[in-house]
Image (cartoon, rainbow, N blue to C red):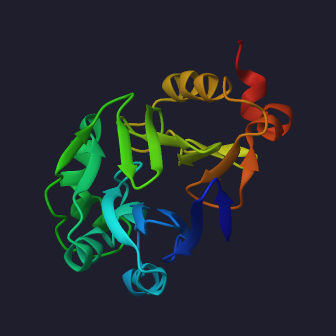
Amino acid sequence: MQKNKNGVRFSVMAVGPLQANCIVVWDVSLKEGIVIDPGDEPETIMELIEKEGISVRHIVCTHAHFDHVGAVPEIKEKTGAPVAVHKDEMELYEGVADQAALWGYKLEPLPPASRLLEDGDILEAGLVRLKVIHTPGHSPGGICLHGDGVLITGDTLFLGSIGRTDFYGGDYGLIKKSLARLAAFPPDTLILPGHGPSSTIGNELKSNPFYQEIDF
């Protein structure tokens, strides 16, 4: 799936056995971009990058569960781009091999993070500007990214659901606060989640059962 917003293109690819969404965002004129959650199938991700001639400026992890970071080593090796992770996610990021093993998967060690993100940080690539929104709950350092009317929600918010909070570092009270924060975005804000199809903030406020539990 590809969406165009003001000269910026968003491409979503479901990769790996858990079908995590890897999102590539780039400036179609300057050919500079950002790779978000390269979880698996590095060859598929690189095929798009090479086809479009994208110079990757950042590799960003919305969180460090293995299905969202598994292809980070290969994408970094091929693009040379620095890796950015929220500072509260480093325990999971550095321990991802053990985490993957619990699910029966084997991952090679991840490269050190070059940038530790904080709430409000801006990631830029050409005309692409994505603002970091710290949304803990699914994991301690989970983030969403907002730019050009698009909200990349990782595993915080899905179409009709939310990320699980029963994993290590999850917290249902915190994810409710994160969901309340996302509710402040305009109703027509496009949501590109970490799994599954897209939605909008307005649609989720109306139909997502988890939003009915929040006292705004």
Q: Residue at x 70, y 19 (%)?
A: 214
Of residues 73 and 210, which is closer to you in this image? 73
- Look at the image and tell me in which quarter the C terminus lies: top right
The percent coordinates of residue 208 (x first, y second) are 78, 38
- For residue 59, side relative to residue 5 (left or right): left
Q: Furthest residue to the top?
A: 216
Q: In the rendered image of this protein, does residue 146 appear above or below residue 192? A: above
Residue in the picture at 18% in, 52% down:
113
Q: Choose top left, top right, bottom left or bottom right for residue 181.
A: top right
The x, y position of residue 140, in whole percent, is 36, 34
Q: Is residue 107 visible?
A: no
Q: Is residue 178 above or below residue 12?
A: above
Q: Does 199 appear above or below 184?
A: below
Q: Which residue does the image show at 45% across and 45% down from the upper left?
A: 129
x, y percent for residue 144? 49, 41
Question: Which one is in front, 8 or 135?
Answer: 8
The quadrant of the rendering that contains the N terminus is: bottom right
Q: Is residue 177 visible?
A: yes
| Residue 187 in the figure: left or right of residue 81 | right
On the image, which quarter does residue 82 sit in? bottom left
Q: Relative to residue 174, is residue 66 drawn left or right? A: left
Q: Horizontal and vertical percent for residue 10?
A: 58, 62
